[in-house]
Image (cartoon, coloured by chain):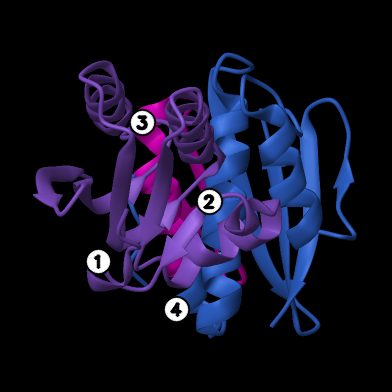
Chain colours: A purple, B blue
Amino acid sequence: MDLNLQTSTEGDWTVIAVSGELDLYTVTPLEDALSASVAKGDVRIALDLSQVGFMDSSSLGVLVAALKRTRERDGTVALVGVQGSPAKVLALTGLDAVFAMAPTLDALPTA
Amino acid sequence: MSVPAGATHGTDAVELRVPAEPASLATVRLFSASVGTAFGVSADVTEDLKLVLSELCAGSVGVSDTFRVTVASISGQLRVECRGTAWASGPDADRRKGILEALLPDVDYSADVVSFALDL
């Protein structure tokens, strides 16, 4: 099952739109995209997960690692449009209270 | 009933055997969806089953050569037995364990076998 990523800019946010299913097998491209974004100095990264139908614990590890790296630079990672099974996984692990969450890209806070 | 390659089924049980590899995870979720359809499982329980079996299959990577899951419908419950997996292993073990324990409060597990039941 393919994972598709598209990177764009919305105001001062770097947006990575993800579609597909995120698991131990598919998460590597997202990990690479997040690492590249952090490496080039992005500190406000929004992950649009509205088209993600499944997310597992391996994916959470990648998201948490990215959050830690951006926080070291006073930045953040926001999760956008999370619904269904991914929302449940975030709630079960308590990570819905750790990440900034937004229902849509329009709802992301401005600097 | 439509089941993925690697799956077999008898009159009241289905079984899937896949290599214990990350590439098998999507097949395991497809199997879970097929089980949900075949046994008339609700959409919510089917989603939980997909998550649990995918996590258990991920836990089999590096632990075993084969991940095997057997599902049967007995007395209003879906009885599931997984072999070739560790309850929670690998770099994401703590988060995996948290997810599994939250979804499976009455799980039974030993070194190589995880079994649980979900209400239909």
Percent x, y for residue B5?
Answer: 32, 46
Depth check: A26 or B30 in front? A26
- Is residue A57 shown left or right of residue B108? left
Chain for mark 4?
B
- Quadrant containing the N terminus of chain B in the rendered view: bottom left
- Under mark 2, the amino acid is Phe
- Under mark 4, the amino acid is Thr
Label 4: few (<14), some (14–19) or many (≥20) C-alpha neighbours in 10 Å: some
State which quadrant residue A35 falls in.
top left
Do marks 1 and 4 share a subunit? no
Percent x, y for residue B19?
Answer: 45, 26
Q: Circle 4 — which element? A: helix
Identify the residue position indicated by label 2 in the image.
Answer: A99
Q: Nearer the viewer, mark 3 or mark 1?
A: 1
Can see residue A77?
yes
- Under mark 3, the amino acid is Tyr
